Image: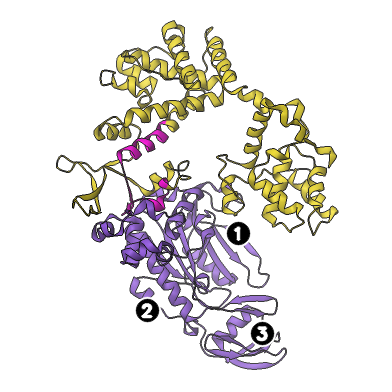
Amino acid sequence: MRKIPFFSRYPFLITLDDYLKNLFSTPPSLQQLIEIREYRELGIKRAIKALRNEGYVAGKDELKEVIAFHLAIFFTRLADPWALRKFADYESKRGFSQLIAETEDVIASVARKLKLKLNPLITESNRCGYRVVLGKEVRSGVELVECYPFSVSVPTYLRLTGKLSGDPKWKLVNRVVKSGQVFISKKDAARLLEEVIKQTIISYGERVGREYIESKYLPECINKVRSVVREVRGFTSDEEKEIPAEVKGKIIESLFPPCIRSIEETLLRGEHLSHHQRFALATFLLNIGASVDYVLGLFKHSPDYNERIARYQIEHLAGMRGSRKKYFVYSCEKMKTLGLCVAECGTLNPVQYYVAGLKKFRLNKKQFSRIHSSKSL
Amino acid sequence: MPDDYILREFAFQDYLSEKYIRHLSFQSLASLREYLVNKTPRNSYYSVAIYRDPAATTMEDKGLIGAELMFDIDSDHIEGCDAPILKLGGRELHIVTEKCIELGKEHELRLLDVLMNDFGFSKKEIRIYFTGNRGFHTIVRPKDEEWLKLGSRERREIIDYIKGVSLEISLILPKKARNMDKEGLLRSGGWRRRILVTNPNIKEIINSPEKVIKSAVVEIDEQVTQDLSRLIRIPKTINGKTGFPVSLFKTENELMSFRYGEQLSPFKGKALVKSLITTPKFKIWSYQIQLVKEQTMLLPLSLAICLGLNKAVQLLKVM
């Protein structure tokens, strides 16, 4: 591993511009790089390996690897939004697995380059860092010691662990926190860096996506990436946006997320719903394509149902009245705050859960028998 | 007031109509004072958030720069506080007792311990107020601007840390009690320290962790801390529910020597009042009182103001 040059291993640590400027007095443009078959093909290969979750081993030619990495970002960015996210996810995980094999000094150096304020606590004389004595082995008398070679500030830690805090291990409450610092192991430092790498790659993609490049090779590169997206996911992101014809105008209740199902069940039992429960249920249904009459039909089970008032409120949420603004369902985060979330689904909002279920549904039409037509209610 | 008051949104509740007037900003403290004197609002607030344009009417247009950290301890939400809710006509008034406020102070001290020892804030970064009613507001203006930029989700994690939500003893302490090094664990920080500070008996920690965790939890209002658009009462203004002023504690000693009671009211003397409602006998502060509609009586001015603010009496004459 040591023989592989630094930027071949960690190409996300430098922008393509900066890398090329260090080597050439007149750096080649992105367009010129795409014209070179060797770079173009390695770029596509890197993108495809990532999309298929296949192992990618970087070569010793640092220039080639850095160019191919950045071309892969460019191709995935233009091909499909999911492809860029997948590429970033894959490359950041790859980064993590390389970083845990590095010394603390290399990890600190990578963090500095990624502008992460990771405080190294190891010195020549102290190879443990922040040392915590937990106790002693009763028989041997050997001290039970925890070593924390790094710390990060509490706000930095909170910012980076947003997607990790579902795991109790990552919750701040279960961490060693002192004087505004969270103390972390080498492996945890690499895991936090994985999050930073992911964000860095996505931001490169967003930046490079704004560039206009005219190249006769570009459509072919993009199409190759798109075809692998279709192969892996079954569809591309723009195809996903179209509601499949067989489920258009129909609501599949078995695909509702647990929180919405729970609210619906409460309503069907004829129990009173809070304002937030009503808002969540109605906006969810309206946003997955249910008609006002469908929503109204459900709310008939409410003990305080009044058709005139309920219709007015639902039409208001649907953007048919008042400000003409169509309301979107609460985010999962908000649902948690309101105490309406009942399970960790890993989605941003309840509609996303439903849409993801629809995709699987398309692949498994046996569930079709469970469809209820929105007009039937 | 904070130095950056020109970047804060101000909001007031009108005395008579009780409607809220929001999205105001002031370019000088003199103009704020002038507004307060001329309008005599029922309640006066400013935003915990710092905006580019605080007077804009939508959050998008206001342009959020960041928000201070805010913690609210309502003493009547703490176990052991027995504060009945007074029903004055159509209004409800939570009058707490001295015992409740003492419990609130205990939780405030626990909060200060976490803010200073665990989060590393200095005394200069922390402001503590008595809200004029049920408890304490603690505002942190961190020097490290990264704190100000935390969103609701990150603030939710701070709440969980302070309240011990999702704390797993097995993740923070070694399994066998006899192996533990108390001093080492105390020095290490986090909940290890918090638990051992409140309960040095390690066996009890292992045998009944829930009880031990409870003794170190700070009862903060979760909604307040995670809401970036929250409003803070302006210091020294009157709380429109009690007539007590919002008071700032300059030192921890001032907080410790704080005593709850009618002496907090700046309104001294007596007042002739007419009852607007009839109530059964009730206790408020050191008084036992019963109101009979249309009856006039002489009351201490502090009590008359409190009941007047709650539309239970009408002030006829200040004596």
Which amino acid is tagged 2?
Ser
Task: Indicate the quadrant where residue B20 lies.
Answer: bottom right
Which amino acid is tagged 3?
Gln
Q: Is residue B42 left or right of residue A85?
A: right
Point out the stretch of residues depicted in magenta.
A169-197
Answer yes or no: are tags 2 and 3 on the same subunit. yes
Q: Which of marks 1 and 2 is in front?
A: 2
Mark-to-mark CA distance, 2 and 3:
34 Å
Residue of label 2:
B257
Q: Is residue A272 left or right of residue B41?
A: right
Residue of label 3:
B314
For the point 62% across and 38% down, the residue is A353
Q: Mark 2 lies on which chain?
A: B
Judged from the image, the secondary structure of the residue bearing numbered disc 1 is strand
Answer yes or no: are tags 1 and 3 on the same subunit. yes
Q: Mark 1 lies on which chain?
A: B
Report crowding for label 1: few under 14, some 14 to 19, many 20 or more residues within 10 A (C-alpha). Answer: some
Q: Do the residues labelled 1 and 2 touch (CB within 8 Å)?
A: no
How far from the left and from the top, in percent, is residue A366? 72, 28
Which amino acid is tagged 1?
Arg
Colour given to chain B in the rendered image: purple
Colour given to chain A in the rendered image: yellow
Is A88 colored magenta in this rendering?
A: no
How far from the left and from the top, in percent, is residue B43? 57, 69
Q: Which of marks 2 and 3 is nearer the N terminus?
A: 2
Residue of label 1:
B22
Q: Quadrant of the C terminus of chain B?
A: bottom right
Q: Work out which residue is located at the far left of the displayed protein and give it.
A: A125
Q: Earlier in the sequence, mark 1 or mark 2?
A: 1
